[in-house]
């Protein structure tokens, strides 16, 4: 693959690109023993219910059989994930048979839905619980196929290889809601206390006369109300709270973990640190991490200093949460329990190796389906070709924008094209090829940019996208944009955010393969890598250079991604 420059790869491999050709050696002596999990032993009495099967898609390859050999370099260029056998066999020390996580999908657009799904997957991996997918339902704005409306009935399996996640990770099992209800709820389930997580003697019947297949049911509120009553719902507010996983499940009380936050200099003089978190965070502590990331292997209190971000409440994965048969995560705006956050900004691990494992699980397994990547590879190859034809001196490379308009509620980002040009003229070279991902389809709007650059849009590649579900077009826009040499995005947009995360994943490989990177974060192997990427924002001048300077996580978390999610996550120091 190319190293983050967005140009053409010199690879001449076939369109099915095995990761083994490009994965660096990760194993060190004794590494297999450092993650203190265990192999999952299936319950001898429970039937196997899982999406995993012997025919599950191999996540370690990107297979594009319909693409010509000429597109193989573009296929290789898009790969950012790794294959790690040791990760595949790790199981959380919290694993207990017969424990589940259920959740409600976010009510926002696709990238809000994806963000929440990543957090739930991270929680399933961390807890060792079986992940129960919600039933098929409509997703906001994903109704693009006007001719084949069946393509608009979507679930997570339409976007991710969910069955392969269960197949390739011993520590994560994934089942459908129908499988869960058939197994656990046919005869009703006991009501569970929201205060203690304890089951009562009251048995609640499954709604609609025991309906187990809720796929396509227009009103699924009854099902989720049932789950809220029969599962333990610990009210967590991800924008204000965070969840800690102790290294030892037997030492998991709040009192066991309060040492992480009771660090005297973390608080202003007005705050008295005691057995609770004070919201008066010392900004001098926060600012001390700007440009100076904490080592990924640092002691837990030191990592907490960067992670804390002035939030008001720490939750601990304590005995009540561990013992609950079902944990349910609702979407309830009244309670503030919407999972509109990054998984790495919500969950903290006392054991840094488990933290890195969960981050790798999301990177290496929660990735778009092959058909989305393959369609993007066709477009990417065509973009390189057009760039090369426009100016051979650029070697086929290009820059990229994401310009969000449409129904976007953040009016301060709605600049006219001339204003966008003025704000970014110092970042781009006139005459460069620029790919623009956008929901503004009036080409006249972009005239000021098209007068200076060779502008391309996804709509220019409908031939390459023939037969592709239109609901995938946004994801394809993201993948192509992620390979721009310079990328300029929209502040507040989770669409832009995911592009930057993928750029961070790619940057990780580039820096570690070349032994460089820049920045102030010196890792244990003597290499510098602070996770910054060559990305910018066109609106809000104060945010323009956010991605090229290392900053710790801070609320609100959703407007951008942070290097904490990808920086040095493959490092396993002795």
Image: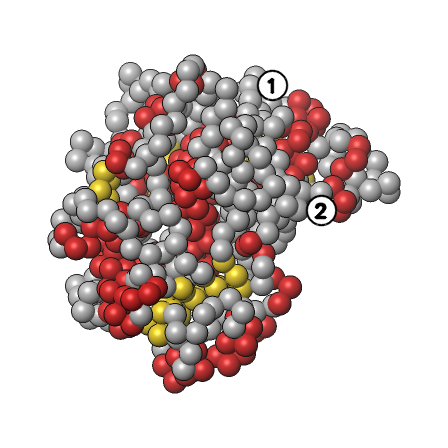
Task: Decide which of 246, 224 is in the foreground and name it.
Answer: 246
Say which residue appears at 80% left-offset and 32% top-offset.
264
- What residue would you read off at disc 2? 287
Instruction: From this view, report whether residue 541 is shown above or below residue 267.
Output: below
Task: Decide which of 362, 100 is in the foreground and name it.
Answer: 362
Say which residue appears at 35% left-offset and 74% top-offset.
454
> How many residues crowd mark 1 within 10 Å: few (<14), some (14–19), many (20+)?
few
Instruction: From this view, report whether residue 467 is shown above or below residue 189.
Output: below
Disc number at residue 251? 1
Q: How is the image coloured?
A: secondary structure
Point out residue 362 in the picture as x, y percentages from the top left corner: 41, 40
* Residue 345 in the figure: left or right of residue 63: right
* Residue 391 in the figure: left or right of residue 282: left
Say which residue appears at 17% left-offset and 63% top-offset.
467
Hey, which quadrant is residue 460 in on the image?
bottom left
Instruction: From this view, report whether residue 403 is shown above or below residue 369.
Output: below
> How many residues crowd mark 2 within 10 Å: few (<14), some (14–19), many (20+)?
few
Lower position in the chain sequence, tag 2 or tag 1: 1
């Amino acid at each position: 693959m190319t190293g983050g420059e967005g140009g053409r790869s010199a690879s001449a491999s076939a369109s099915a690109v095995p990761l083994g050709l490009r994965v660096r050696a990760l194993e060190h002596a004794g590494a297999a023993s450092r993650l203190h999990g265990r192999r999952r032993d299936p319950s001898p009495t429970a039937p196997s219910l899982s999406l995993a099967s012997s025919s599950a898609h191999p996540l370690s390859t990107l297979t594009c059989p319909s693409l010509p050999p000429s597109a193989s370099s573009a296929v290789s260029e898009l790969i950012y994930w790794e294959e790690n056998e040791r990760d595949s066999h790790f199981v959380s020390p919290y694993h207990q048979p017969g424990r589940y996580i259920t959740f409600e999908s976010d009510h926002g657009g696709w990238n809000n839905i994806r963000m929440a799904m990543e957090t739930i997957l991270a929680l399933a991996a961390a807890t060792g619980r079986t992940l129960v997918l919600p039933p098929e339902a409509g997703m906001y704005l994903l109704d693009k196929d006007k001719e084949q409306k069946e393509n608009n009935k979507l679930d997570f399996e339409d976007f991710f290889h969910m069955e392969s996640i269960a197949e390739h990770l011993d520590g994560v099992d994934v089942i459908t809601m129908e499988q869960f209800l058939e197994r656990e709820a046919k005869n009703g389930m006991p009501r569970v206390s929201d205060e203690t997580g304890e089951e009562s003697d009251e048995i609640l019947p499954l709604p609609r006369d025991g309906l187990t297949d809720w796929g396509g049911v227009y009103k699924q509120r009854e099902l989720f109300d049932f789950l809220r009553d029969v599962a333990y719902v610990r009210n967590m507010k991800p924008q204000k709270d965070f969840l800690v996983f102790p290294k030892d499940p037997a030492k998991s009380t709040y009192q066991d973990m309060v040492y992480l936050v009771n660090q005297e200099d973390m608080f202003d003089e007005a705050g008295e640190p005691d057995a609770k978190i004070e919201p008066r965070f010392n900004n001098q502590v926060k600012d001390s991490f700007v440009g100076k990331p904490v080592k990924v292997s640092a002691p837990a209190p030191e990592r907490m200093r960067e992670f804390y971000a002035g939030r008001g409440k720490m939750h601990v994965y304590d005995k009540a949460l561990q013992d609950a048969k079902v944990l349910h995560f609702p979407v309830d705006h009244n309670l503030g329990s919407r999972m509109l956050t990054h998984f790495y900004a919500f969950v903290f691990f006392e054991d840094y190796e488990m933290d890195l494992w969960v981050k790798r699980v999301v990177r290496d397994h929660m990735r778009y389906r092959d058909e989305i990547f393959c369609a993007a590879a066709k477009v990417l190859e065509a973009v390189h070709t057009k760039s090369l034809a426009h100016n051979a001196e650029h070697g086929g490379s290009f820059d990229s924008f994401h310009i969000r308009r449409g129904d976007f509620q953040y009016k301060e980002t709605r600049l006219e094209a001339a204003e966008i040009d003025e704000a970014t003229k110092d970042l781009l070279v006139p005459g460069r090829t620029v790919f623009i991902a956008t929901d503004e389809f009036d080409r006249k709007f972009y005239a000021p940019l098209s007068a200076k650059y060779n502008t391309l849009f996804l709509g220019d590649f409908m031939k390459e996208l023939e037969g592709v579900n239109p609901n995938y077009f946004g994801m394809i826009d993201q993948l192509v944009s992620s390979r721009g040499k310079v990328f300029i995005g929209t502040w507040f947009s989770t669409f832009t955010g995911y592009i930057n995360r993928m750029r961070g994943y790619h940057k990780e490989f580039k820096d570690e393969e070349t032994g460089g990177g820049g920045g102030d974060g010196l890792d244990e192997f003597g290499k510098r890598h602070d996770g910054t990427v060559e990305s910018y924002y066109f609106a809000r001048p104060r945010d323009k250079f956010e991605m090229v300077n290392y900053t710790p996580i801070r609320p609100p978390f959703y407007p951008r991604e942070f290097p904490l999610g990808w920086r040095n996550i493959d490092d396993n120091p002795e």
